[in-house]
Amino acid sequence: MAALWQFPGGIHPTGNKHQSSARAIREAGLPPALILPLHQHIGAPAQTRVEVGDHVLKGDCLADAQGPMGVPVHAPTSGAIEAISLQPVPHPSGLSDWCITLIPDGQDSWGQRHPVSDYQQHERTDILAHIRRAGIVGLGGAGFPTSVKLKPPAQDTITTLILNAAECEPYITADDRLMRERAADIIAGLDIMAWLVRPERCLIGIEDNKPEAIGALEEATRGSLIEVIVIPTRYPSGGEKQLIQILTGREVPHGGIPADIGVICQNVGTAAAVARAIHQGEPLISRITTVTGNAVGTAGNFDVRLGTPVDYLLTCAGAQDKAIQQLIHGGPMMGFTLTNPAVPVVKSTNCIIAAGTGELPGPAEEQPCIRCGACAEACPMELLPQQLFWTSKSGEFDKAEHLNLFDCIECGVCAYVCPSNIPLVQYYRHAKGEVRTRRAEQIKADQARQRFDARQARLERDQAEKEARRKERASAMVARSPLEPDQPENSKAARGAAVREALARKNRTPSSKAGSGDTPATVASPGTGASAAETTAQPPDLADLEKQLAQARNKLNTMAGMLKEAQAGNADNVDKLERAVAKNRERVTRAEQALADARTRVDATPTSTD
Amino acid sequence: MGSVIATSRTSSPHARRARSTSQVMLWVMVATLPGLAMQTVYFGWGNLINVVLCVLLAVGAEAMVLALRKRPLTFYLKDNTAAVTGLLLGLALPPLAPWWVSAMAVVTAIVLAKQLYGGLGSNPFNPAMVGYALVLVSFPLAMTTNWAAPAGLWQAAPDLSATVQSIFGGGQTAVDAFTMATPLDVYKHEITSHVASEVWQNPTFGTGIAKGWEWVNVAFLSGGIGLIVLRIITWHIPVSMLAALTVMSLAFGSNPDVTTPLSLHMLAGATMLGAFFIATDPVSAATSHQGKLIYGAGIGVLLYLIRTWGNYPDAVAFAVLLMNFAAPFIDHYTQPRTYGHRKARRGIASKGH
């Protein structure tokens, strides 16, 4: 007997398993129509490969796997494809999804099956591909593709393969009956999985409330290295993380997967499906589902084809429509309510509860939390459910995340024990949803900001380049400019030239009234002293220059005033203003000089005004 | 089969088996009965009358505020929390305290300390202790001179009519014959001028440890153990509080000729009532196991400090209220380590972590 560990908290809900565990597994038979959702697993929905009107055989692939986490969907019987349409599916939201509707032809004739003989002679990757092609996902409820789970990341060495036979949820006995009746299949599947992952130990964890199943497993594993480990009955011992803790004493790291600590955990039903896929070549087209609750006449387990409508299955178990108060898909702790009994059985449908009056009453009216801490005592993850509740309720999602909101496995024990009838799990689901939405929005906002920043940087760069070009041009001009102060010997003549140039430009304009015929001469004779045209144009030019000077001075004053203000206010544009003031000062000096120069010239040519 | 099944959509879990708040409170009340019985046996009818008075007043005050706040009356009243607050005050107040002292304590507890903070679950302070502390500091005379002398119901204790008269009558002089300072009070003052053997001669102590008080405390202790067995409270707060009180007493007061001995700290005064029924009020206490240990120990330390060096002979109310202040802080730094985490995530959530 291996040493066992304990997980903290947990509860002992009323089992309610005897109602369904006493009867042998029954064949549910062929319903009038099978509705096969394309999305019965996590990962991308499968892609249909059949068309309406096609005739298919049992086991034919109807839809191909998409993406690394996808698995295909197969025909559970032979018949005709009637529709590919949106149908209500079993989902907490109650929404519809794409489904293939198959009308059985009653022949139930198999198509091509591909059993693998001597699987050990094959490459492991081939066997994994075979398991994937068989459409196998975890049948415990999560719907995780089995082939993905059996191929852990390269850096993880698997030491322990665990078969989860705990079946800790009340009411559900599907695994129990499967173990009692088909233990050999389960062990055959476990052998294949063990060959695939090569663990040091192979464990089966089973709760002590299933003595017949324990006996069957022990019988089937006699002489092998597989250890059947009986664990105390305590919900949620069948939670993957909890079972690993019980059997190995180790915890799956936050944000990690069991393979990170060398563990792979598979459900017993999944093992049986793997054995069928390899040895018989049959894909996953049926499963064992418990149908129970006070509203059904003969509760029990059914070997049911995927796609079978729930109401058909309820009829098989002798359910009375009127007696059904609550219809639950899954167990009473983690399952969700069905509002439409026409939804099909899918790969994760381990149980249908048709509860009678008063059996699973809705919660009483929510009372204030008195912080009694019963939830924290019961939480198997050692969270503080009441703190999570306060923060989730008040929308303080940062705090909720800090309290490890995302480590919550939604097992429901907190709400089960809450004296104030608070639907705690619902609050956590809401908070998780909000946080996920906000994260998505944050990512969007970050991208938008990055785009904006990039654009801003580009604009600034353009501006800087423009500025650089302008400066270059300006300095080139200055280099040519006769106004360079370090060339005093030339300055006078050069200034005169500049003035003339300006005048020439002015005269070229149509509004110019001065003798237009002289213009070319003026242009043609720069720096050759006063000409007739030049002298006649002098007086208006002086006024112009005076005006320019005044303008420049005004601007300089304004700029200086702004600079003073900026300096007083310690503003960050002081540098810019300083540069502007210097520039304007230079401009004023230039204008002054130009004016003075012009005046001298005017004085030197007194004839002009006469 | 038709698709006419009218089932509702509810969130998991669909199964529940919880003791309701109302049941929890009822159990708390039941667990106080041995203590109340001992109080009555040793100190007369005073506590019983106080309990009835305080429970009625508490429920009345709660109903009044709920009506003012336009809340459904029966929905809230049936949670029994107001009754528990009244009950605890009735047990804690001096048996012969005049009715208006009790009334003021109860109204303060329910209206001020509970409802004005938002009602059940929202009060940062223990309502009963807020009420108690208010009357203790406001009416020190009435709160220290009305402790019944331990006389035994079958002996010299005032009969029912005399007790009723002393509580509801105007004159307090009539009851002087039945009252006596508490053992903690007597020891604290006598020991300054006498040695222990002389102090023990005082009639307050009787032949046992504290003449009746020890049985009251033992009764509350047994009721408290019952609550732990029933999983209504956890052991953390009472055990750490009593342990801290013991450690303080042994460390600073091991000489009975100088300070009150451990036996009196444990079995006189409101120690057991405080440890099992008052400090364990979940609303105003710390929440995690580790937090509860710190919270309880803090109460034990403060209880000793105030009893020994403060002006009050007993200090459960002040010790509890002071630790109520600290509870949110303690909660931030005592979160348990969650499954799969290498260490506990403590402190206050930072933005954008």
Image (cartoon, rainbow, N blue to C red):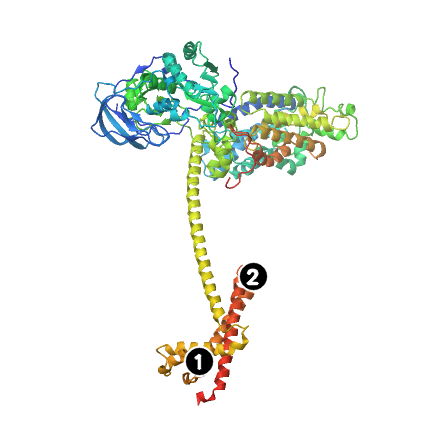
On residue A569, which mark appears?
2
Q: Residue A148 location in percent, x, y?
A: 40, 26
Q: Mark 1 lies on which chain?
A: A
Q: Residue at x 60, y 33 (%)?
A: B129
Q: Residue at x 77, y 31 (%)?
A: B192
Q: Residue A106 location in percent, x, y?
A: 21, 19
Q: In which quarter of the image is residue A295?
A: top left
Q: Which chain carries label 2?
A: A
Q: Quadrant of residue B127?
A: top right
| A186 sits left or right of B281 in the view | left
Q: Residue A296: tell me if it is visible.
A: yes
Q: Circle 2 sits in a helix, a strand or a loop, which is it?
A: loop
Nearer the observer: mark 2 or 1; the answer is 1
Q: Residue A245 location in percent, x, y?
A: 50, 22
Viewer-proximal residue among B84 and A352: A352
- Mark 2 belongs to which amino acid? Gly
Name which of mark 2 and mark 1 comes first in the sequence.
1
Query: Which quadrant would the N terminus of chain B be assigned to in this image?
Result: top left
| B199 sits left or right of B115 in the view | right
Q: Residue B340 location in percent, x, y?
A: 51, 28
Residues under labels 2 and 1: Cα distance?
Answer: 42 Å
Label 2: few (<14), some or many (≥20) within 10 Å? few
Label 1: few (<14), some or many (≥20) within 10 Å? many
On residue A541, which mark appears?
1
